Image (cartoon, rainbow, N blue to C red):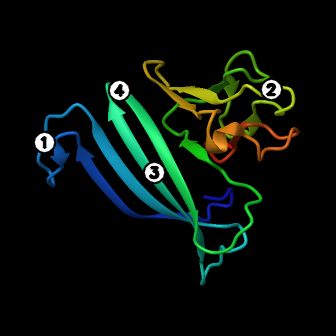
């Protein structure tokens, strides 16, 4: 979703299965691992139109959930010839996560207020080791750690210029790892 509240993505399919097999609708199943596959279609800033929205990227996520840990794998496919100028990669929607964030290895040494404000982890040239951020719930019982493997794919940050942050929060309530 863009800051102006225009939806720029839609989920076209999802599947859920376990290490024990395909889940049957509304039937509980004992398992060790749950897998979720989600396919989204994404519009570019210049293909968003009230009447003729055109998706240019397909994202295929596979989530593996085991022992309270969620591993996410993402494959991005272009649906037409495109030039990616900005890609908002891994994102969190922050409404349920209180009002602060910690950018690990970033410019801020402690938590930063994110309620209706924009901020970031600092420029890549000064803070090249930022590959995660931590959100806590309002009661401080749970935390969400979003991180990216900086040995592979988008996580190498080779497409991020030195004067850009590696992670940031937008005032409309999303935090993003580029």
Circle 3 Cα neighbour tier, 10 Å, few/some/many (<14 / 14–19 / ≥20): some
Relative to 116, say whether 9 is above or below: below
Mark nearer the N terminus (4 vs 1): 1
Res 69 label:
none
The residue at the point 65 percent across, 78 percent down is 49
Mark nearer the N terminus (2 vs 4): 4
Res 61 label:
3
For residue 110, side relative to residue 65 (left or right): right
Q: CA distance from mark 2 to mark 1?
A: 45 Å
Secondary structure beneath dot 3 equals strand
- The residue beneath circle 1 is 28
Q: CA distance from mark 4 to mark 3?
A: 18 Å
The residue at the point 62 percent across, 48 percent down is 89
Instruction: Choose top left, top right, bottom left or bottom right for residue 178.
Output: top right
Mark 3 or mark 1: which is in front? 3
Circle 2 Cα neighbour tier, 10 Å, few/some/many (<14 / 14–19 / ≥20): some
Q: CA distance from mark 2 to mark 4?
A: 30 Å
Residue 41 horizontal/vertical position (percent) = 52, 66
Task: Say if mark 2 contacts mark 4, CB within 8 Å.
Answer: no
Residue 77 horizontal/vertical position (percent) = 56, 63
Relative to 65, say whether 102 is above or below: above
State the residue in front, 101 or 122: 122
Mark nearer the N terminus (3 vs 2): 3
Q: CA distance from mark 3 to mark 1?
A: 23 Å
Mark nearer the N terminus (4 vs 3): 3
Secondary structure beneath dot 2 equals loop
- The residue beneath circle 2 is 127
For residue 13, say whether it is visible: yes
Residue 85 horizontal/vertical position (percent) = 77, 59
């Amino acid at each position: 979703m863009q800051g102006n509240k225009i939806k720029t993505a839609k989920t076209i399919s999802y599947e859920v299965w376990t290490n024990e097999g395909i889940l049957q609708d509304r039937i509980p199943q004992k398992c060790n691992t749950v897998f979720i596959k989600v396919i989204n279609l994404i519009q570019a800033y210049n293909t968003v139109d009230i009447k003729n929205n055109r998706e240019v990227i397909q994202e295929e996520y596979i989530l593996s959930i085991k022992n309270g840990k969620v591993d996410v794998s993402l494959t991005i496919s272009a649906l037409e010839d495109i030039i990616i100028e900005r890609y908002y990669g891994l994102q969190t929607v922050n409404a349920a996560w209180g009002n602060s964030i910690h950018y690990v290895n970033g410019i801020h040494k402690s938590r930063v207020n994110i309620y209706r404000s924009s901020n970031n982890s600092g420029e890549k040239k000064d803070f090249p080791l930022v590959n995660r951020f931590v959100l806590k719930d309002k009661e401080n019982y749970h935390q969400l750690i979003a991180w990216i493997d900086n040995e592979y794919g988008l996580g190498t940050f080779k497409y991020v210029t030195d004067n850009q942050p590696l992670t940031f929060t937008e005032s409309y309530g999303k935090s993003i790892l580029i």
